[in-house]
Image: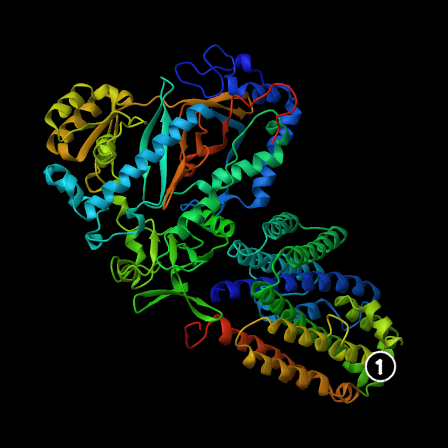
Amino acid sequence: MLSSVAERVYWLGRYLERVENAARLINVYSTMLLDLPSGSHIGWSLLIDITGANEDYQRAHQSVDEKQVVKFLLAEGKNPASVINCVSMMRENARTTREIIPSEAWELINNLYLTLKEDFSRTISRRLRQQALETAIGDCQRIFGVLTGCMNHDTAFAFIQLGRKIERADMTSRIVDVGSISMLPAYSRTTKQKRFLEPHENIVWMNVLRCVSGYQAYRQRTQSQVKGEDVVKFLLQDQAFPRALGYCLDDIVQHLGKLPKNADVLRAVARAKKVTLAVNVGDLLERGLLEFIDELQISIADIHEEINNTWFRPVELRKKA
Amino acid sequence: MSIDWKAYSSPGFFDELISASGKPRPCSRSPTAYLASLSDEELQRRQEAIKHAIKTMGISFTVYSEAGNIDREWPFDLIPRIIPLSEWQTTSQGLEQRLRALNCFIHDVYNEGKILRNDPFLKSLIVDSGNYRPQCVGMKPKFQVWANVCGTDLVRDKDGRFYVLEDNLRVPSGVSYMLENRTVTKRVFPELFEHSEILPNSDYPSQLYDMLSSLSPRGRAKPEVVVLTPGIYNSAYFEHSFLAQQMGAELVQGSDLIVEDDRVYMKTIDGLAPVDVIYRRIDDLFLDPKAFNPDSMLGVAGLMGAWLKGNVALANAPGAGVADDKVIYTYVPKLIRYYLGEEPILPNVESYLCIDPVQLDHVLKNLDKLVVKPANESGGYGMLMGPKASKKEREEFAARIKANPRNYMAQPLVYLSTAPILTPDGVEPRHIDLRPFILQGRNTYVTAGGLTRVALVKGSYVVNSSQGGGSKDTWIVDERGTTTGSGGGI
């Protein structure tokens, strides 16, 4: 398989996952804000934090409100992380790998792009926005379904899966980060804050779970009430929930098995796994997650780097045996 | 208001579907009757469905001038163009014959040069041609075939006969649109296929693959065949990726390939993998910055060397374009007689070379009836549409021709045949041409039909997609198997 093609299908996988996650996140977040008191410190700006597009937003906007934030996250051409840009990049990667991916998948991707472009070109009501995003989530799942059902499960598919799972691991780590940042006051000794947030703590954690479609799964796995510590533990260390970091990393190892010269990448995954699984979540919440999340995200970025160096842009070109 | 064939006519031209008396030709009877049975609403719906299918399938072409909008949907008319099988059989024999002769000629030019010995004019023409590549002298590609893929443009004149307008021997494009047009028609109009025996055209990609693998210099059971594209910004990128996909071949850009010790490798996730056959969709001069244009970012340094050593096959071979020239074109009937000892099956459009004093005289006397074109690329100073030009324009052009007769050739105006298209005002005739594709490797192959291009503007003769042209599905119909009742479907 060509290195350049491998790189494109890998990014196809990443964008596919990114679009689905972003759509889910915006939907869940909008719903959650309806449940929170208007004075709550959890506002629309947090949503921009999660996507990591803070600087881009500040460059273009003076104030933060629902209309602006949502437009920025969905349709803003200047925001590289906007849903429409991610779909466009996914389409571009699909367009340049049409010789590899099933034509049915290409048609779905192309259609998703055309539909969203049309939908987002208008200012849309909350209800229609919700519908459009649900369609996007469903389409992403269909696209992956077609890829899974119609493509050879060979190297190209393994690269799509790698891209998907790395993106997913990254997203879950961001969500844990943000979920707990919003909770920090509850764990601090500022009793005033604590009292203020207590009735809503539950709601926030439930929605954190919903962002990764993990509410039901959490219930089934932990059989306990929704508690910050348990949720973080579940999202980081669960071995059965497909969006939990621990599971994603195991999955990555599986897909790497299909690829040649994988030793360096496997080592990077092992390092990330150690970071994820070795940590004591209870202690972590007491002292704050900041450092830990940084370490975690660096270890995920390292996996990407190793993939890059091994397959996409190897420093040294060796002839195939 | 649905389609009324009685109200349709194309006076002065040969119409492909409806004869002069307003009646459908035998092969068109059942599809035209079916179309006439549809209500206006239903036709509208199908038209919409076609637009939608083309959009979803991402069938597009690129317009260079429109910055920012690199993709445009493919304009397509839903009424098929229909050619009877018996006529097509002869036509395709003529196309094969032409390509075989042209390949003998190209091989001769770069090797023994037999045909040039007694023809100093032809010899000087060749050497001066912008498409002659001295680097290729002495090269013997497999099967002595240089142009492996040829797109020959056919036009039908008032007399109802096919004439060859030109042979595209460099990197002809359009075949993917031929295939996608059929897919779209099947998707939107499955009923049309019920009563006609329409030859399938979907085997082209596998024929192309077989031809390409027959060129492999090594005896590997499964040669590595790649499609070399200039990239996403090329107007034919859609086609490159389409063909690669259909053949299961790698689609590569210059940056994916590397030449070491005169061997071509592609950069894969396993390391460097040897390449056997390159179906290149890049012009000669951009193929190899070492051999040709040093500024080319599209090509692969050292590719020519690898090819000349016989380590990799290039289709079409560099230098094949030498026969893709307006003056050489006038020689093709002679080439067929010279190399094959056969009579040409397909006629050329009559052409006059101004370098010949007798022909020049005829051209100057008949400027009001002729189309004058530059004879070679380097000497091109525009063209003259005699019948449409003013007296003053003709006189000015005559002076230019006399000053430099060698640079000009002339042809009578061809009254391109028409076919009906669906417009908001009902069916109307539009001018069309036809580009079949011919393959030659170990064997030869001609597509069943080809790409029909339509000048969508009323009265226009310009069929190019970049200038308002569209296309139609092209059917080769076995008139014996076509029924008017039920059954006989495909």
Chain ID for label 1?
Answer: A
Q: Residue A211, position in %: x, y? A: 75, 67
Q: In the rendered view, how is the structure colored?
A: rainbow
- Residue denoted by label 1: A194
The residue closer to the viewer here, B44 or B388, is B44
Please identify the quadrant where the C terminus of chain A is shown: bottom left
Indicate left or right for B114 with A287 as reference. Answer: left
**Closer to the camera, B166 or B246?**
B246
Residue under the image location 52 percent in, 66 percent down: A7
Determine whether the residue tagged by mark 1 lies in a helix, strand or loop.
helix
**Position in image of residue A104 (x %, y %):** 62, 49
Left or right? Give the position of A221 relative to B462.
right
Picture quadrant where residue A171 is located: bottom right
Amino acid type at mark 1:
Lys
Q: Residue B255: name its quadrant.
A: bottom left
Question: Measured from the top left, where is residue B287 in percent x and y?
Answer: 31, 56
Residue A177 visible in the shown view = no
- The image shows residue B97, relative to residue B236, as above or below, that is above
For the residue pair B126 and B8, the one nearer the viewer reads as B126
Which residue lies most toward the top here? Answer: B21
Q: Nearer the viewer, residue B240 or B6?
A: B240
Callout 1 crowding tier (Cα within 10 Å): few <14, some 14–19, many ≥20: some
Q: How many marks are shown on the rendered structure?
A: 1
Question: Left or right: where does residue A119 sit relative to residue A264?
Answer: right
> Does the image show residue A141?
yes
Left or right of B37 on screen, residue A244: right
The image quadrant that residue A276 belongs to is: bottom right
Q: Is residue A254 above or below residue B456?
A: below
Q: Position of residue A143 (x, y in %)?
A: 66, 55
